[in-house]
Amino acid sequence: MQPHLLAGMAELVDAPDSKSGDGDIVRVRFSFPAPLISKQWPMTTILLYPSASLIRRLCAILYDTLLLIALAMVGTFILLLFTQGHAITPHNLHYQLYLCCLIATFFVGFWTRGGQTVGMLAWQLKVVTLSGQALSIKQALVRLFLAILCLLLGGIGWIWVLWDPEKQTLYDRLSKTRLISLNSRKH
């Protein structure tokens, strides 16, 4: 790494001491910013990022909804290949479960691998655990189930952000996750 790139990331820990005889040794501590796609962030790094606002969350959901519609269309097309082009009734339980699995795979896959769906990436949001780690599959499934439940209950779990002192949704609180905004840091 170039010396000028290290400026602001190094801290002098121990200066040379002429009395102890090791005047040539200088101890320096380096701190590098955590990458956006790391599996684990230090807790201090996570606390530097504010929770996402309701508007940003809804915009990311809008982007993801458009992608999910396209995914459902492609998934249905693939299914039609196996039915020789015969229509699939919307009330078909197997078809509904198939679409639910596609949707769950979309969210769980993105949340456990980098913490961001495409909509979250566009709006610079990231979901992490309270300790700054990537979500496990179980935690992502719990978060998804609770988010859907909150939506079915009139969106009260989503609107919870407006009253919560830490700007967390009810399903984030219950699943012990946090949706952070990456484009602004607390000072």
Image: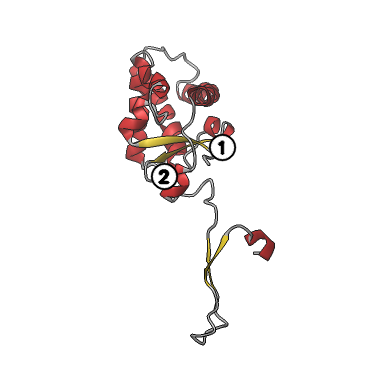
The furthest residue to the bottom? 21
What separation in Å lies between label 1 and label 2 (alpha carbons)? Answer: 20 Å
Of residues 65 and 134, the one nearer the viewer is 134
Residue drawn at 56 percent across, 83 percent down: 23
Q: Point out the tag, 1 or 2, that comes first from the N-terminus.
A: 2
Q: Dot 1 surroundings within 10 Å: few (below 14), some, or many (20 or more)?
A: few
Q: Secondary structure at mark 1?
A: loop
Residue 46 falls in image quadrant: top left
Of residues 126 and 8, the one nearer the viewer is 8
State the quadrant of the N terminus: bottom right
State which mark lies toward you, 1 or 2. 1
Quickly name the residue at label 2. Answer: 134
Under mark 2, the amino acid is Ala
Quickly name the residue at label 1. Answer: 184
Question: Residue 131, percent across and down?
Answer: 37, 45
Of residues 154 and 78, the one nearer the viewer is 154
Check the image and report above or below for 136 versus 161. Answer: below
Question: Residue 37, percent across and down?
Answer: 52, 46
Is 73 displayed left or right of 4 in the figure? left
Under mark 1, the amino acid is Ser
Question: Residue 39, percent across and down?
Answer: 45, 49
Is 23 displayed left or right of 7 in the figure? left
Residue drawn at 55 percent across, 56 percent down: 32
Question: Residue 145, percent across and down?
Answer: 33, 27
Q: Is residue 144 visible?
A: yes
Check the image and report above or below for 109 versus 154. Answer: below
